[in-house]
Image (cartoon, grey):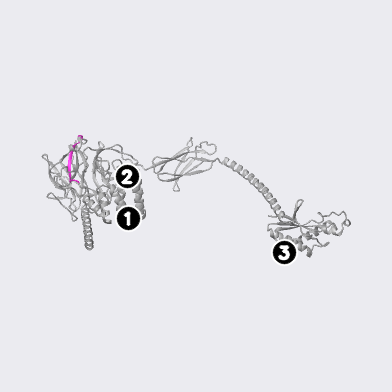
Amino acid sequence: MKKAITFLFTLFITFLSQAQHKDLERANKYFKRTFYTQAIPLYEKFLKNEQSIEAIKNLADSYYYTSNMNKASKNYKYLLKKYKKYVDESYYLKYANTLKALNKHKEANNILRMFYKINNPEKLVALEKEIEYLENIAALGDRFTIKSLGINTPESEFGAIQEGNTVFFSAPRKENMYGKKFGWNGQQYLDIYEVSADKIHLGDSVTIPFSEKINTKLHESNIVFTKNGKTAYFTRNSSVKGKRKTDGKKITHVQLFKSDFIDGEWKNITSLPFNSNEYSTEHPALSSDDKTLYFASDMPNGFGSFDIYKIAILEDGSFGEPENLGETINTPKKEQFPFISKNNKLYFSSNGHPNFGSLDVFVSTLTNGVFSKPDNVGFPVNSGYDDFSFNINSDTNEGFFASNRLGGEGSDDIYKIKEEKPLVIEACKQFISGVITDVDTEEILSNATIVLTKNGEIAQKATTDNKGKFSFTVTCKSSYKVTASKTGYTTEQTIVKTDTKRNKNNDASLALKSLKVLEMEKAIAIQLLQEKEQKIKAENLVKLQLKKKERIKEVIDKEKDIVKLKDKIIYKTDEINFDYNLWYLRRDTKRAIDKVIALMKKYPDMVIEIGTHTDIRGKNKYNLKLSQKRATSVRMYFMDNGIEPDRISATGYGESQPLIKCATEEACSEEQHELNRRCEFVIKKIY
């Protein structure tokens, strides 16, 4: 029984795995044929149980191409987080576009910044320029007023163009008479509809299909008419005898068709001679003289994806050769939906020029056969979603465009527009201004020189007016140094870093110092410093003396042989006497001196004066000389026993300081004279 259960479970898992891989195969087949709405549920089902980089990529792309930017963004985020090394630049770009659609422009820019910083620094430079350009466009504000039309539905409406009092546009077939839906977005195939211009606010019920001859069970869209209304050009699926024609990859392309209005009917519907079953030609537009047909195509040898082309319409109704409008207009990405106005302005949609996300509308001026560099037409026509099929009457400045942005009825919606102000792009600018004053008196300083430098080079110069004011116009996101100077004053400077806020004023006011006042203050400062130094010295001397007294007291208390006698501090030793008229040290005196040496070694900072004295016998001059010899003899003994010379001084006092005063030589005994022939050790310093 257990074996049977195990077998059945294994068999079930096998069948489940096979079913899942069949779902993946079907999803991939739909994806390759651009049937994204049919591929999405199969990828979702497969990814619930298994992981596949290819499946995640295709699911994200399927949501992206059907404009479900929220789900596309989540899948791209997961893909870049988990399988970062397996994805190329295109996925970063598409992820950034989804973020823009979700109004997360800063996050989108940072995603690309990080990618290019590592993988392509040159593109990082280009990205920063693109961001700055778009900031300049955004600064123009809303250049148009736009209004959603009443004919919009949850399905797709686009390609509106007005001829007389009639508006023609493209929309999914109202009735599913053929029982088929378009695999890309799951809607009915497109037909061309018309509505009276004064009824477009009434709703979808007032629209009627265009010609039954032109509308078929395939796609028809983007119709344009010659000025006389006798000829129409439109887009239709590539077909043979009413059936879709596919290329080698089973993809059905679209082609341009022409029809003539004869006897109240549209007849002679013909495919244009430059069409092909291997590529698409689409979105016709006519020049004001009806001599040039503009269109979009992904034909070979273009710049990539869809490009804008033009072709001459000859007098006999035949056509010249298709001519690519070149790299000024076309990029490696999509350029579609051309429209040429009466004043020779080419409008088209592109995701290859600097844009706010997905397809944006751009404009280029045709002058002497040369197209200018296109500019983004700005807000609110452009958004983070697809904005396309733009046209405008240059006399009234009114027209139409389509967008799949949020807030509409659903899918693509048509908006009526009016251009309210011209496209005049200005670089982001700010101001650096201020007032120069005297730092002490706060008096304004006129005729002061102000120098503005950027990257070490002088950018601008100015002189303050009679109110001390100056002002410079500068660029955003830059760093400047402002230097102010005036004769008789100091030179001062400040750094100003501008941000991205337009027309912001940056205050760079500076205060200068009078040189005369400065010299006077320096003199006062020097005097005060000297007084302070003297005060500190006096305070330090008092502290030193106090410390000295405390140290002396400490040593006196500790060393019983150190005593203070009047104004002297003396080391009291056994008597050190000299033989009469001699200066040599006696053996008994050396023992007493050794005690003093031991004391000095105990106190390494101690300084002592050796003072020697004589009795009154002999002449005073002789005695003074004799006492100096005795003092020197004792000092030499100290040095011989390791005491540094600078710690001992020797002074002979002669008979000038007797212990016992003798009126005459005979008045004192020999013992008294010997006491006067003494050697004293006076402590001059203890620490």
- Nearer-the-camera pick, 340 or 607: 607
Specify few, some or many for label 1: CA neighbours under 10 Å numbering under 14, 14-19, or 20 or more.
few
For residue 489, what is the image quadrant? top right
Check the picture and name the quadrant holding the C terminus. Answer: bottom right
- Nearer-the-camera pick, 348 or 675: 675
Mark 2, residue position: 103
What residue range appears in magenta? Answer: 187-198
Q: Residue 381 carries which label?
A: none
For residue 406, what is the image quadrant? top left
Specify few, some or many for label 2: CA neighbours under 10 Å numbering under 14, 14-19, or 20 or more.
some
Q: Is residue 333 left or right of residue 598?
A: left
Check the picture and name the quadrant holding the N terminus. Answer: bottom left
Q: Classify mark 3: helix, strand or loop.
A: helix
| Amino acid on which the number 3 mark rests in the picture | Asp
Question: Most extreme residue toward the bottom, as rendered?
Answer: 587
Magenta highlight on residue 195: yes
| Amino acid on which the number 2 mark rests in the picture | Asn
Specify few, some or many for label 3: CA neighbours under 10 Å numbering under 14, 14-19, or 20 or more.
few
Q: Residue 82 carries which label?
A: 1
Mark 3, residue position: 640
For the residues labelled 3 and 2, say whether their Cβ atoms are less than 8 Å apart.
Answer: no
Instruction: First in sequence, mark 3 or 2: give its number.
Output: 2
